[in-house]
Image (cartoon, grey):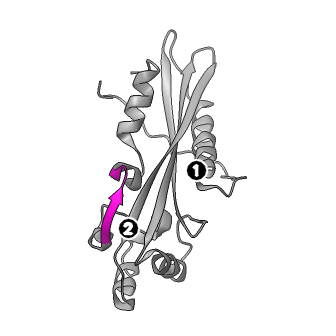
Amino acid sequence: MVLSEYEVIPARGEETVNSTDPAEAVKELSFQKAMEVSRIVKPCEGDRIIVIGADTVVAADGRILGKPADRADAARMIGLLQGREHHVYTGVTVCCVQQSKDIRHFSFYEETAVDVYPMNRGEIEGYISLQEPYDKAGAYGIQGAFSVFIRGIRGDYNNVVGLPVARLYHEMASRGLL
């Protein structure tokens, strides 16, 4: 089944993470986002609304890399990632909201290993001069200009983009939500 009708409702609440483990952190963040939106949606009588919250982080050397704060932070992140492998984690929480405001939910995470070619200073500077790095975890988008620096991946490409759609489909289907 293909979802034909949906609406994007951004979560606006303060994100707080208690875990330093990337897998647990993204599950926490996705849960916070999904629950925030679940509390404001209003299903019609007899209907249900499915809310999907997701969050992605990049992890290298045991450190979580979120979105870069500025140009220097983007350069630091790309410098850390270039020439080696790192991991991308996306947490997903799916909430099923009934008219009674009963909210059932489940969460999972997906992990993908990404290997980046070595980059010289000029390549790093050229990349961070674009707008692309500044709204992405780890300061890069695999689907954009940074793609020329990707040596390979192990796992789900769509996870690195930000949503492991195949896994999401199968998790929802196995629970009768499609």
Left or right of residue 174, residue 103 in this image: right
The residue labelled by disc 2 is 115
Give the prevailing secondary structure in the magenta stretch. strand
User: Tag 1's secondary structure?
Assistant: helix
Indicate which disc residue 95 carries: none
The range drawn in magenta is 150-157
Give the residue type that dot 2 points to: Asp
Indicate which disc residue 23 carries: 1
User: Tag 2's secondary structure?
Assistant: strand
The quadrant holding residue 31 is top right
Instruction: Give x and y (percent) for residue 42.
Output: 55, 23
Q: Which of marks 1 and 2 is nearer the N terminus?
A: 1
Instruction: Give x and y (percent) for residue 32.
Output: 63, 42
User: Looking at the picture, does residue 93 appear above or below residue 142?
Assistant: above
Q: Which of 63 and 139 is in front in this view?
A: 63
Magenta span has 156? yes
